[in-house]
Image (tube, rainbow, N blue to C red):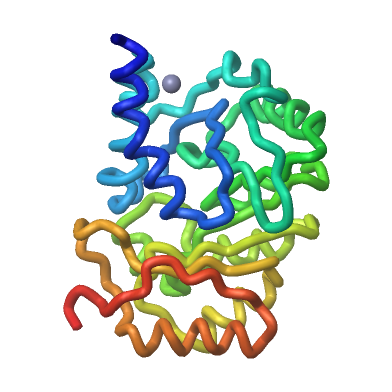
């Protein structure tokens, strides 16, 4: 009976995972938690982690406090599917790498390096932290850039401002990068397109907030389409997520 309820509660998370990244074959969270306190994260990721935390009885998951789940490093050959082409396993999608302690990172990366026939995505909103590790070839590094406008991000999050994220990420010497512009907020077309071009990602994910709350300062649809077209003209593949009119349009 207990197993049945675990499955029931995990189904919404699986659905969510597919919506967030089309190529993500699975999410794997040996590290969980974040202190950036982004307002749009509360009704999405934090709610999901809390639900799983309740099922497995992890108080730190319920509070979204940065912590390690070393038991999730076991039996990975069986637990994680092999990936092909653009597919990847989203490593720590319910946490920001910047809050993972050095010892936790070391153990996670050792496990990742052993699984050469799987590709992993690791994301942060503080890409300066990527300089503290050497990442194996089967890792894609990612950042979120919801906008280029620092003041819009600072109103909803404690994460480093987008201008710093883009500079720090450009300076990271790793060949496989992606940028996520989701949930998109109003932006300056030339600046944001130039930043993404400089980062030179394998692809860019663009999408509006998939939740109704909070009401973010969204760009009009036509502006988002201009960003997509500008990037594609520059040879940067764009994966369209939830593309719709702004809530106040
Ligand atoms: Zn936990």
Q: Please say if 133 is above or below 147.
A: above
**In what quadrant of the picture does the C terminus appear?**
bottom left
Is residue 145 rendered to the left or right of residue 134? left
Q: Of all residues shown, which one is farthest toward the top?
A: 1
The image quadrant of residue 4 is top left
Q: Please say if 194 is above or below 25.
A: below
Q: Is residue 146 visible?
A: no
Along the line of sight, the residue nearer the viewer: 103 or 139:
139
Q: Please say if 104 is above or below 212.
A: above
Q: How many marks?
A: 0
Q: Position of residue 123 (x, y in %)?
A: 58, 48
Identified at 44% across, 46% down, the residue is 17
Along the line of sight, the residue nearer the viewer: 199 or 150:
199
Identified at 41% across, 79% down, the residue is 187
Is residue 30 rendered to the left or right of residue 235? left
Q: Position of residue 172 (x, y in %)?
A: 74, 57
Identified at 44% across, 54% down, the residue is 20
Q: Position of residue 207 (x, y in %)?
A: 41, 68
Is residue 210 rendered to the left or right of residue 214? right
Q: Please say if 189 is above or below 2.
A: below
Q: Quadrant of ligand 1?
A: top left
Is residue 237 rendered to the left or right of residue 5? right
């Amino acid at each position: 009976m207990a197993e049945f309820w675990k499955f029931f509660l995990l189904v919404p998370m699986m659905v969510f995972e597919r919506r967030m990244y089309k190529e993500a074959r699975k999410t794997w969270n040996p590290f969980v938690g974040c202190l950036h306190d982004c307002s749009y994260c509360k009704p999405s990721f934090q709610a999901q982690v809390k639900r799983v935390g309740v099922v497995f009885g992890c108080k730190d998951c319920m509070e979204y406090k940065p912590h390690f789940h070393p038991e999730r490093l076991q039996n990975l050959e069986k637990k994680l599917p092999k990936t092909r082409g653009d597919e990847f396993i989203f490593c720590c999608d319910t946490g920001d790498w910047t809050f993972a302690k050095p010892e936790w990172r070391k153990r996670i990366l050792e496990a990742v390096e052993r699984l050469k026939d799987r590709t992993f995505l690791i994301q942060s909103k503080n890409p300066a932290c990527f300089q503290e590790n050497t990442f194996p070839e089967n890792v894609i590094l990612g950042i979120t850039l919801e906008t280029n406008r620092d003041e819009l991000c600072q109103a909803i999050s404690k994460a480093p401002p987008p201008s710093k994220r883009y500079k720090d990420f450009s300076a990271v010497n790793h060949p496989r990068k992606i940028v996520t512009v989701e949930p998109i907020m109003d932006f300056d077309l030339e600046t944001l397109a130039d930043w993404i071009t400089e980062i030179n990602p394998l692809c860019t994910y663009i999408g509006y907030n998939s939740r109704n709350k909070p009401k973010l300062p969204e760009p009009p649809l036509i502006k988002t389409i201009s960003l997509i077209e500008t990037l594609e003209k520059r040879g940067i593949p764009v994966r369209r997520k939830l593309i719709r009119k702004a809530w106040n349009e």
